[in-house]
């Protein structure tokens, strides 16, 4: 009984304590709600995991249609579909690199001064690419100083260069090939080389704006003034042909540095551009007497366009596999698409001639 009385007393004591605590600072519902009404509202933000960004394609802005650099294998050398052709040489750069002439740096172009023409073709191969002999022959020079004829001259515009005198000639005259602006010469003077042997490496020595190979064909003499267009001497890709033209006014005066556009039909793309030779140390082929050459054209029909006396002139020429297609323009007399007349005996023989 005594224990029961003690427990009841303790219960009432605890109730009284809780009520007193609520009055002083204990939690009661009404005051808390009233205080919450007077407090600024704070938005509750649950932590969120950002959604992954959707997969997107970034498409480049369409540009001009590129001109393919792909070329088929070359015809075997020597190659000549016509009795008057002389595709005797392979290309001096292998097919796994750029081995065709730069469009802006063809034979007969004028780049550095109005009275200096380009006596070869430039091939835009990579630095260090192997430079190959275009035909069998003997290395007669491998040094600086080719242009100035001063061996060892490191100020020579041709830079480090190699000259090969070939085992065959043309019209009883010697044939030479020139390889300039090398970063390194590998061949030695007096060495006999075969087609495809490494002569050196592509570089930018001499007067250049960047690494490339300057390639020349010289006939008769090993001089700057005895060059001919290499695009008429190196074999074209199989199934492709070469466009050759002679452009003059009505009085048969050669038209220099005339821009000519060559468009494949029917779509007219890609457009190829070539200029006629400048005046100076260039020589036309004895048979074609040309002042324009554009090689590496896939067989097909092409539209030829140029401006003469501020008027657009045009004709159509068909390119045949492995052949030269020839046209003439004579000012107001217009175009003709036919081969020159047969050459005189002074142009014979018409095949490569062994040199004793």
Image (cartoon, rainbow, N blue to C red):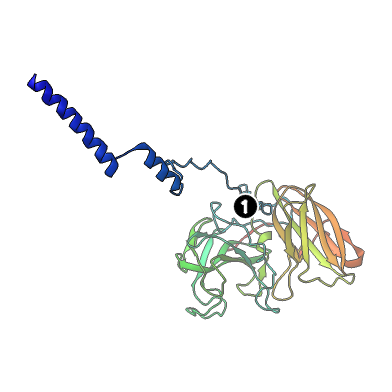
Residue 191 in view here? yes
Q: Which residue is mark 1?
A: 69
Residue 331 point in image, percent of width and height:
88, 67
Residue 284 point in image, percent of width and height:
74, 67
Quadrant in the picture for the N terminus: top left
The residue sitting at 66% across, 47% down in the picture is 238
**In this rendering, would 13 be left or right of 50?**
left
Please say if 121 is above or below 13.
below
Residues 64 and 104: in front is 64
Residue 285 point in image, percent of width and height:
73, 65
In what element is the residue under mark 1? loop
Q: Which corner quadrant of the image does residue 148 belong to?
A: bottom right
Q: Which corner quadrant of the image does residue 274 belong to?
A: bottom right
Which residue ends up furthest to the left in the rendered image?
2
Residues 30 and 189: in front is 30
Quadrant in the picture for the C terminus: bottom right
Please say if 327 is above or below 115.
above
Residues 343 and 107: in front is 107
**In this rendering, would 345 be left or right of 35?**
right
Residue 272 point in image, percent of width and height:
72, 57
Which residue ends up furthest to the right in the rendered image?
333
* Crowd band around label 1 with a 10 angstrom C-alpha radius: few (<14), some (14–19), many (20+): few
């Amino acid at each position: 009984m005594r224990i029961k009385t003690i427990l009841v007393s303790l219960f009432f004591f605890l109730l009284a304590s809780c009520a007193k605590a609520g009055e002083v600072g204990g939690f009661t519902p009404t005051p808390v709600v009233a205080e919450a009404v007077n407090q600024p509202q704070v938005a509750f933000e649950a932590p969120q995991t950002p959604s992954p960004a959707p997969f997107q394609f970034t498409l480049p802005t369409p540009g001009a249609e590129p001109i393919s650099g792909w070329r088929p294998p070359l015809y075997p050398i020597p190659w000549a579909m016509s009795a008057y052709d002389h595709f005797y040489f392979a290309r001096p750069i292998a097919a796994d690199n750029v081995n065709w002439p730069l469009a802006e740096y063809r034979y007969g172009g004028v780049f550095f001064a109005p009275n200096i023409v380009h006596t070869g073709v430039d091939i835009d191969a990579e630095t260090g690419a192997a430079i190959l002999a275009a035909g069998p022959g003997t290395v007669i020079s491998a040094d600086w100083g080719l242009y100035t004829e001063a061996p060892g001259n490191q100020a020579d515009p041709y830079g480090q260069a190699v000259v090969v005198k070939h085992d065959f000639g043309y019209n009883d005259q010697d044939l030479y090939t020139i390889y300039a602006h090398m970063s390194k010469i590998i061949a030695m003077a007096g060495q006999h080389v075969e087609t495809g042997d490494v002569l050196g490496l592509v570089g930018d020595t001499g007067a250049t704006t960047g690494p490339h190979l300057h390639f020349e064909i010289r006939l008769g003499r090993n001089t700057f003034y005895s060059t001919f267009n290499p695009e008429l001497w190196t074999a074209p890709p199989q199934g492709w042909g070469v466009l050759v033209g002679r452009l003059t006014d009505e009085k048969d005066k050669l038209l220099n540095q005339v821009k000519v556009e060559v468009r494949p039909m029917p779509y007219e793309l890609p457009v190829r551009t070539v200029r006629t030779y400048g005046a100076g140390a260039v020589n036309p082929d004895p048979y074609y007497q040309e002042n324009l050459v554009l090689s590496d054209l896939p067989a097909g029909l092409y539209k030829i366009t140029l401006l003469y006396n501020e008027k657009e002139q045009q004709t159509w020429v068909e390119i045949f596999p492995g052949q030269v297609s020839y046209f003439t323009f004579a000012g107001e007399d217009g175009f003709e698409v036919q081969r020159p007349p047969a050459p005189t005996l002074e142009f014979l023989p018409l095949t490569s001639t062994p040199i004793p």
